[in-house]
Amino acid sequence: MTSYDDPIDADRFGPLADIPESSLLHLGSRIASNVLKLSNPEPKLLHRLGGPFNIVHILSFNNDTTRFIIRVPATGWGKGLTPAADKALEAQVSALKFIKSQKDAKIPVPEVYDWDSTCNNEINAPYICLSYLPGKQVLRVWTDDNGPMPKEHMRLRILTSLTNVMAEFAKLPSFDRLGSLFLDDNGNVTIGPVYRREEDPDGPVTIHECGIYTSGQEYLRTMMERDSQDNHWGQAESKITSTLISLLPKPDSEDFVLAPPDFDSANILVNPDTGEVTGLIEWDLTHTKPRWLGYSAYPYFLTRDWDPLMYGWPNISSEDSPEALAAYRAHYSSELGRALGRQGDWVFTDKSHLTMAVWISTLNPANRLEICQKFLTEAWEGKVDALSVVWEIGKEKYGEEEWEVLKKKLRTFLAEGSKRHPGKSEGKGYEEKDKDKNEEK
């Protein structure tokens, strides 16, 4: 019997929420027979899970000796069915196949068994069929007070294991442009456009093609121009965020790397008994990223204090305090440094919570005001009313001299990073990193 573990948003998914179980079983049987070569497969639909952008169906075969997943994207109906959505699904498949083809890199991503970007199939919808990865979401393990070991011990184990997995991404080749990967039948890779989602509260999600870019700053400035709001608040937010973009790293010759597109606790699977990472899931809209926000960046759940709109501490008990997040970042940075031999992209890790905040502010206008305020507050060490400063900038009441002082403050803050305002344990983490470097000398 099917288990509906998570609710499915009928407005977002429309007819996709009611795909007949019999149709899913017919599709599963075909894939099991033709791809996995199972003889006389006996399919069973175990779970139908509703996420924000996909419905996940978990199928088992022959008394649960085999499992796989059929994911149906929210773009698979109505006006969501566009050429851009087709290409975005193809790019997701290409990225997963490319990672799987790199035998030297041991990265636990699902294998693609089958996919179809059209509706000409048993379920009358686009889908991607993936291997089943065991494990439990970090989202659930992180807050578990009744696990097999003390919660803090489990958390540090998860972070250490995750750094070992992310270090494997350093073994993948880099790319000369920021964009989506496309893989041909011979395994050759080309870089195509970035694809972005747009949400309609009254209908399906849509995908839009954005272009190919030669620098991270170029990409962010283009997105900023697309999403800027034409009012005094929006103008102030754009001016501050544009300044932050200009302060991001500017390598002499920029290349780009692969990393999980949504590197958060819901998309990382671990063994709930040991904390070992068993899978990285949710590869929708994968594209190459600048090295300063690639595989060496902190996972999002360690940087929530830098996205204030989404951060519920201290009102939400499951949230970690800023001091705790700083301590976890210090541990993660130290362990990733060990895994990467204190070399390469590790140089970007310490400030990646700041670069990620700039990235989020640029790509998500709804989050922009609070992130701008956070940067102003930290740059001024809490000595200004950040909201008033934003208002004055938007109303053009902030003089040129004042603006130059503000830019200098932001520049200094980003240059110094969180050494400027370390948490109780983050300062220790930096001391340990300096000690490691001195020992190596």
Image: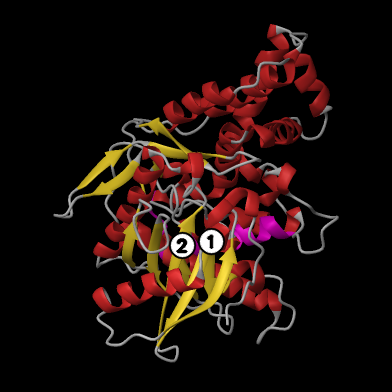
59 vs 103, nearest the viewer: 59
- Dot 2 alpha-carbon crowd within 10 angstroms: few under 14, some 14 to 19, many 20 or more: many
Q: Answer above or below: position of 229 versus 13.
A: above
Amino acid type, residue under disc 1 in the picture: Ile
Q: Is residue 119 left or right of residue 304?
A: left
Tell me how many marks there are: 2
Extreme-left residue of the structure: 186
| Residue 366 in sight in this render | yes
Give the image location of residue 434, x and y in percent: 53, 54
Q: Mark 1 points at which residue?
A: 55
Instruction: Identify the residue at image location x=64%, y=28%.
Output: 410
Give the image location of residue 65, x and y in percent: 40, 89
Q: In which quarter of the image is the C terminus?
A: bottom left
- Dot 1 alpha-carbon crowd within 10 angstroms: few under 14, some 14 to 19, many 20 or more: many
Query: CB of mark 1 within 8 Å of CB of mark 2?
Result: yes
Assign the magenta stretch its main secondary structure. helix
- Describe the colour scheme in one phrase: secondary structure
Instruction: Check residue 336 for magenta coloring.
Output: yes
Indicate which disc residue 71 carries.
Answer: 2
Q: What stretch is highlighted in magenta?
A: 324-344
Instruction: Identify the residue at image location x=75%, y=11%.
Output: 398
Q: Quadrant of residue 24?
A: bottom left
Q: In which quarter of the image is the N terminus?
A: bottom right
243 vs 435, nearest the viewer: 243
Give the image location of residue 28, x and y in percent: 38, 73
Instruction: Check residue 276 for magenta coloring.
Output: no
Q: Is mark 1 on a helix, strand or loop?
A: strand
